[in-house]
Amino acid sequence: MAEQLVLLGFWASPFAMRVKIALAEKEVGYESREQILFNKSSLLLEMNPVYKKVPVLIHEGKPIYLDSGATISFEALDFTFMTSLSMNVALQFFPNAQMLWARKGERQEAAKKGLIENFKVLEGELGEKTYFGGESFGLIDIALIPFFSFFYAFEILGKFSMEGECPNIVGWAKRCLQRETVSKSIVHDQHKAYEFVLELMARHGVK
């Protein structure tokens, strides 16, 4: 199956990172094809003609998984959707983050507030647990850990300290990063991720 699986992704996409982590956890091999965000390939447009977004997981020439913002949920890898407070908050992360760097004025301030509230809820949900599911690394962890790459951007744009506001989340992120499946699948250079966010803001005319 490894030779037949192709992942269309983009280095800064947290959703692509989720798929990479899930595949690594299942020890499933695949061919990674990096996409250019602002110059979409014909293959991406063919495989995902509706959303035109990454990630797309292709098996034997057919898309078997499209992620338009939801969490991991594809039968091929035996992952199932989980409904919980933490997962619901995880699904709100990207919309709030996106508004943080794509909106101005009151809408941007609302996004900042929403993002911090998201972190506060997760901080309480995590508590002293090793992972969100307890001692086992699971779906909620996979859904959330890619956002570690943007912690610095969140701090700068949201004007708050992750360590100060959410020490449990920071400790959890460090534990997740000790897993090879995570460390090899996400962006470690948070300043590079922040520069990408600045590029997005410039494209949206946001300063």
Image (tube, rainbow, N blue to C red):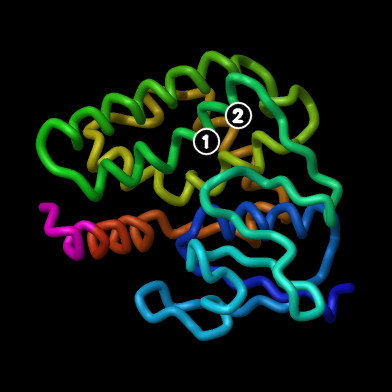
**Residue 48 image-quadrant placement:** bottom right
Residue 147 in percent (x, y) is at 48, 45
Callout 1 secondary element: helix
What is the crowding at mark 1: few (fewer than 14 residues within 10 Å), some, or many (at least 20)? some
Amino acid tagged 2: Met
Q: Which residue is mark 1?
A: 91
Check residue 48 in the rendering and tell me which mark sits there, or answer none: none
Q: Is residue 159 above or below residue 37?
A: above
Q: Is residue 64 left or right of residue 17?
A: right
Q: How many marks?
A: 2
Magenta residue span: 201-207
Amino acid tagged 1: Leu
Q: Nearer the viewer, residue 47 or 190?
A: 47
Q: Is residue 35 above or below residue 182?
A: below
- Where's the N terminus, which quadrant? bottom right
Q: Which residue is mark 2?
A: 87
Q: Is residue 203 magenta?
A: yes
Residue 101 in percent (x, y) is at 25, 48
Q: Is residue 106 above or below residue 14?
A: above
Q: Are marks 1 and 2 in contact (CB under 8 Å)?
A: yes
Cα distance in 3D space between marks 1 and 2:
6 Å
Residue located 49% across and 59% down the image: 13
Q: Nearer the viewer, residue 130 or 78?
A: 78
Residue located 13% across and 53% down the image: 206
**Residue 158 image-quadrant placement:** top left
Residue 35 in percent (x, y) is at 50, 77
Residue 81 in percent (x, y) is at 73, 36
Q: Is residue 120 above or below residue 206?
A: above
Residue located 84% across and 64% down the image: 28
